[in-house]
Amino acid sequence: MAVKRRSNGKTGTSLVGKPHPVCLLPGFYGVGGGYLSHWRDAASYLLVDEATEEGILVDCGSHAGLDALRANVNEVTTLDRIKLVIGTHCHWDHVEAFGHLHEEMDAQFAIHALDVQAVRTGDPDLTCAGFLYNDVFHPFPADIILNGGEQFHIGDYSLQILHLPGHTPGCIGVLMQYALTGQTVLIPGDSVQGGFGKQIKSSLPHWKRSVRGLMAQKIDFMVTNHLPPGSQTGLLADVPHRLARVYSQLETDFYFFADRQWA
């Protein structure tokens, strides 16, 4: 049985500019970030088993976009069928919404061991909630502690956790393989494009090593970690050249950003 989007009774141009799930591949949806939920949210992705309608979320944004995230998930499956939420790292814009969702979902939360304490305590610096977003991180416990190398399966997708420190010590990416074509898709978190600063325990040497590791992988497509104003979600091709460009920026654009923000 194929998962079908639940109708909201609206058609045509009435949906233009409104939050909505975006199908990137069969069973793979963009459901949060930017115009899909809230401009302050990082991108969130939903994988669904088309036979059971069970799902996995990779990142879930913040409480700012919570209502839109709920609506988007419920157009594809139902929130209570989400069994796992994978946090790519501990920052407010990526995972804070789980502090509100965990009591209404039967889902486990997974995050890397080096970022787990920040979400347990709601640390205002390590989560960026205080100094960057002027907001509160609602803390919650982690159910699954990741170290890198873990594998999960959902529908036609196999997921491998890649530990990609640099932006934060526990930053991860999710490398997915789509069984029907054998193609791979990287959900990078902020390991490819994110801010750098001592206050969030960034490390330039670790970040460079992480990107070099990605460049050695077979990656057919990549998705965005943030949706800046005017941008849309989609599958990005030409991944080796995109990663090479990111690598070249780690000592230029990214370093200067750190000087301006956290010197």
Image: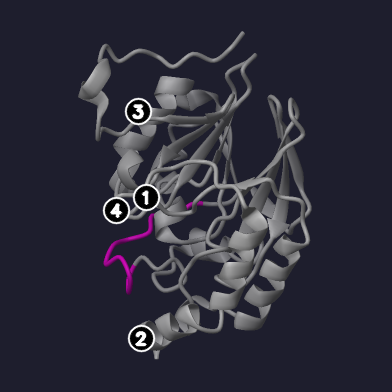
Select label 1 or label 4 by which is in front.
Answer: 4
Residue at the disc numbered 2: 260
Residue at the image point whose x is 43% and y is 28% from the top: 73
* Whole-number angstrom distance, CA of label 3 to CA of label 4: 21 Å
- On residue 229, which mark appears? 4
Dot 3: element: helix
- Please say whether residue 163 is visible from this viewpoint: yes
Residue annotated with mark 1 = 62
Mark 3 vs mark 2: in front: 2
- CA distance separating discs 1 and 3: 14 Å
Q: Position of residue 242 (x, y in %)?
A: 59, 61
- Residue under circle 3? 71
Compare marks 3 and 2 and give the one earlier in the sequence.
3
Whichever of labels 1 and 3 marks the residue nearer the N terminus, that label is 1
Q: Which quarter shows the N terminus?
A: top right
Q: Can I make out residue 170 in this image?
A: no
Percent from the top left, x then y, of residue 149? 78, 53
Tag of residue 39: none
Where does the magenta region start and end? Answer: 130-140
Q: Is residue 56 above or below residue 116?
A: above
Relative to 255, residue 165 above or below: above
Q: Position of residue 47 (x, y in %)?
A: 58, 32
The three-letter code of the residue at mark 2 reads Arg
Label 3 neighbour load within 10 Å: few <14, some 14-19, many 20+:
some
